[in-house]
Image: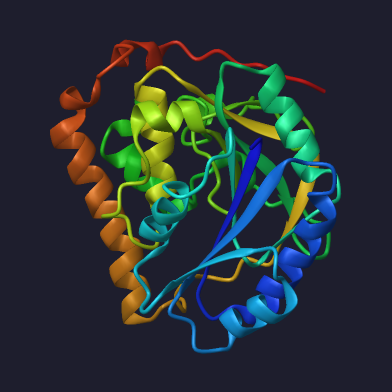
Amino acid sequence: MKLSVIIVNHNLCMWLRQCISALQAARYGVDCEVVVVDNGSDDKSVEMLKSQFTDVKVIENGSNVGIAKAYNQAMGLTSGEYVFLVSPDTIVTKDTLTKAIDFMDTHIEAAGSSIRMVTPQGHFIRSSKYGLTKKWNLLIKWTGLSKYFTKSRITSLNQMQPDEFETAEIDVLNRSAMILRRSVLNKVGLFDERFTMFGYDVDLSFRLKIEGFRNFYFHKTYVINFNIKPVQKYTFSYLRYYYGAMLAFISKYLFELPKLSIGTPVKTLYTPQYEIER
């Protein structure tokens, strides 16, 4: 199997239908499987999947176990050489899968790649390339961890970074649309399930860098993202999950960083190397 496409859904039936419909067209000619992990939806998402997309594998969780754990469930049951993780509020184009696979096949040094994202109005979504939101940028800068994120626009020293239509090495893969090399995941491990709703992408990306692997942003195709939050913004749950992820990340890497250098030494993070394709 060349590709395993995994979607984690919780009460996003309408967007999920659009997402899979687009994937059905994009997967034509690709040796791939599509798996949906449903985290206890009560909006008839599972019923929709079973009646309209009979070739899609469905994993049903009785409750919302979190995005990281749900992805891990599916990755443990799939076999694709590459894993394409896409959120249900995202619509791929017809060439997204083929071009993403071609990129990974020809760039064997890439552990994973984010795909260029645009809004429904066609505006570039900067987080698809730069990964970190303003809050994450500030947190990492204040704690001194910014020295490990040499390819993110955290300080003014990084303002010369390539733009939307340039493929380049990046720090953080975007959670809404990323392709990962399974052989690398077998070495560094899957998502840390302590990052339930947020931060799991930052954590995995950081672990990949620490072990000497490289993350990329790929611009030669795109996806449309509606930016639906996993939990409603400014609610207690949002604050708990979002800022809890930040605290967990800082605690993990300020106190455990020396323990994480299993393969390539951490010092490789100080010598950024960019690869740009126009």
Left or right of 35? Residue 92 is: right
Give the number of marks: 0
Which residue is rendered at x = 36% and y = 26% of the image?
187
Q: Is residue 40 above or below residue 113?
A: below
- Is residue 17 among the parts visible in the rendering? yes
Horizontally, residue 49 falls left or right of residue 219, namely left
At a point 84% along the width and 42% down the height, the residue shown is 29
Q: Is residue 167 visible?
A: no
Q: Position of residue 52 (x, y in %)?
A: 74, 77
Which residue is drawn at the image coordinates 70% and 63% (left, top)? 55
Which residue occupies the foreground of this view, 159 or 84? 84
Q: Quadrant of residue 82?
A: top right
Q: Is residue 38 above or below residue 98?
A: below
The quarter of the image holding the N terminus is: top right
Residue 86: percent from left, percent from top: 61, 54
Instruction: Name the outermost residue toward the left.
Output: 255
Percent of width and height locating residue 68: 39, 56
Q: Which residue is located at x 38 percent, y 81 percent?
A: 235
In the displayed structure, 203 sits above or below 39; it is: above
- The answer to whether 44 is drawn above or below residue 204 in the figure is below
Of residue 148 and residue 100, the one placed in the foreground of this image is 100
Along the line of sight, which residue is nearer the eye, 31 or 182?
Answer: 31
Please state the horizontal and vertical placement of residue 264, each as a whole percent of the image. Answer: 33, 12
Q: Quadrant of the C terminus?
A: top right
- Would residue 95 appear left or right of 4 to someone viewing this image? right
State left or right for residue 219 relative to residue 174.
right
Residue 239, image quadrant: bottom left
